[in-house]
Amino acid sequence: MSGSYDLMPPVAGPHNTPALSSKMAVCAVLAGMMLVVMNTAMATVALPAMAVELRVSPADATWILTAYQAGLLIAMLPCAALGEKFGYRGVFTWGLCLFAASTMACALAPTLGWLVAARLLQGIGGAPIMALGMALLRSIVSHQRLGAAIGWNASVVAFSSAAGPFIGTAIISVAQWSWLFSCALPVVAVVLLATVFLPPSAKKDDPLDLFSMLLSVGVFAALIAALGVLANRPIAGALLLVFSVAQMWILVKRERTNSAPLVPIDLLKHYPLRVSVISSIFCFSGQAVGMVALPFFFQKSLGLSNWVVSGLMAAWPLSVAVMAPFSGALADRFPTAKLCLSGGVGLAFGLFMISLVDNGVAWLLIPCVVLCGFGFSMFNVANNRNMFMGAPMRRSGAMGGLQGTARLVGQTTGAVMMGVLFNLESIEQASRTGLAIGAALVLISAFFSLLSPPR
C-alpha cells in the first residue's frame, strides 16, 4: 500500500481530506478480507490439536473448516444481491457485525457440534465481506489500476494466510483452541469503526426475490451435504446431488429473464468469463486439497514439530504476498491466459513434488512450497482480473459474488475430498494422495485457461 495509486473521487469522512478517506476506505476493505482469510488459516493449522482436544477423528475435525467454507458459499450470491439492492457499504458492515457475534460463539463452543454451527454462522457473516470487497475497491480505485488493486488484495490475503499459521500455533501452544477466536474480536471492532470511510454506492428500487435467495442457499447446502456423505452413504449422497441440481435448474429458469439475476447468468453468457470461472473452481479445489493435506502430511508422515509445520505453511502465502504486486503489474500488461498457464503449472509441479518427499530429502519442502506460492499468485491475480474486466461497473457486486462462489465451491470441494480420503485411507497415505490429486486439479485448471481467447 506504500506505492502510488490512482483513486476514484472519494467520499470524505469527518475531519479528513478526501485522499485520507480513500486510503482509510481501502484499508477497511482489506482489513475485512484479512479477518475472513486469517480465520481459515489459523483453524487449518490447528485442526490436529482441535481434534485431540475435542476428542474427535481427523475426518470429523475437517468439518470445522468445511462449515466455515459452507457458510461463505451458501450466502455469497444472496449477499451480492443484497449489496446491489441496499448498497455495498451497509451490507459489508452488517456482515462484519454477524462475523463478530459468531466469532464470540466459536470461542464459547463446548462441543464440536456447537463449534461447527458457530463456524457456519461465521462464514455467513464473512460472505458479504468477500462478495463485496472487490466491488468496493473497484469503486475507490481507477479503472487503469484494477490489476494493481487485485494485487493489493492478494498481498493482504497472502500475508494473512502466512500470519495465521504462526498465530494459530502460538495460541494453541500456550492456551486452548478457543483463544483462536477470542483474539480476533478486538481487530473486528477496529475494522467496524473504519467502515465509516467506505464510499456510498447506488441502491436499487427493485424488490428482492426471496424465493430465489432461498433456492440459492438450498443449492449449495444440498451440494455440500452430498459431498460429505457420498463416500459412506452413496444413495443419500446421490439423492442430495439430484436435489441440488433440481434447485439450480429452477433457480436458473426463474432468473433467466431478470436483467440483474441473483445467479449472474447475464455475466456467464460471456465465454471468456465462463472459462475463468471454471478455471478458478478447479484451481481452488486443488489448492484446498493441498492446504488441508499439508499439516497432516508434515506432522504425521514426516514427524515435523508444530513450529516447523507453521513455518512451512506460512512459506506458501508469504510467497504469494511477495509475488502478488508483480502478478498485478503483469496482469495489467500481458495476456492473462498465458499467465494463468504459467502459474498453474508451477503450483501443480510444487504440490506433486511435495507428495514425493520423505524424511531423507525434507529440505526440498521449502523450494517446493515457495514454488506453490509463486504459481498460485500468478494464476489467481491474472484470472481474477480477467473476470472483473468482463463485468460492467454496475454489476461489480454480482461479479464479486460469482468470483467468491467459484473460489468457495473449489475450496469446499477440496476440503470435503480430504475428509473422504481420511475415511478411506490412513492419515499418512491420504495426505500424499491428496497432494497428488491437488496437483492434477490445478494442472487441469492451467490448461483449461488456454481456452479463453486472447485479450
Image (spheres, rainbow, N blue to C red):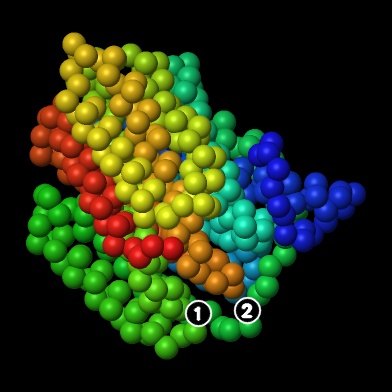
- Marks 2 and 1: in contact by CB < 8 Å? yes
Which corner quadrant of the image does residue 272 belong to?
Answer: bottom left
- Between 6 and 411, the residue placed more toward the observer is 6
- Secondary structure beneath disc 2? loop
Q: Quadrant of the C terminus?
A: bottom left
Q: Is residue 121 left or right of residue 207?
A: left
Q: Mark 2 — residue?
A: 204
Q: Residue at x 40, y 59 (%)?
A: 405
Residue depicted at x 30% and y 74%: 248
Say which residue label 1 marks: 260
Type of amino acid under label 1:
Ala
Q: Where residue 84 sits: x, y (%)? A: 58, 71
| Mark linked to residue 357 | none
Of the two numbered discs 1 and 2 in the rendering, the one whose residue sits closer to the viewer:
1
Instruction: Report the residue that reaches farthest toward the top.
Output: 360
Horizontally, residue 315 falls left or right of residue 299, namely right
Most distant residue in the bottom direction = 257
Decide if residue 435 is in sight here: yes
Residue 401 pos. (x, y %)? 47, 63
Q: Secondary structure at mark 1?
A: loop
The residue at the point 16 percent across, 60 percent down is 237
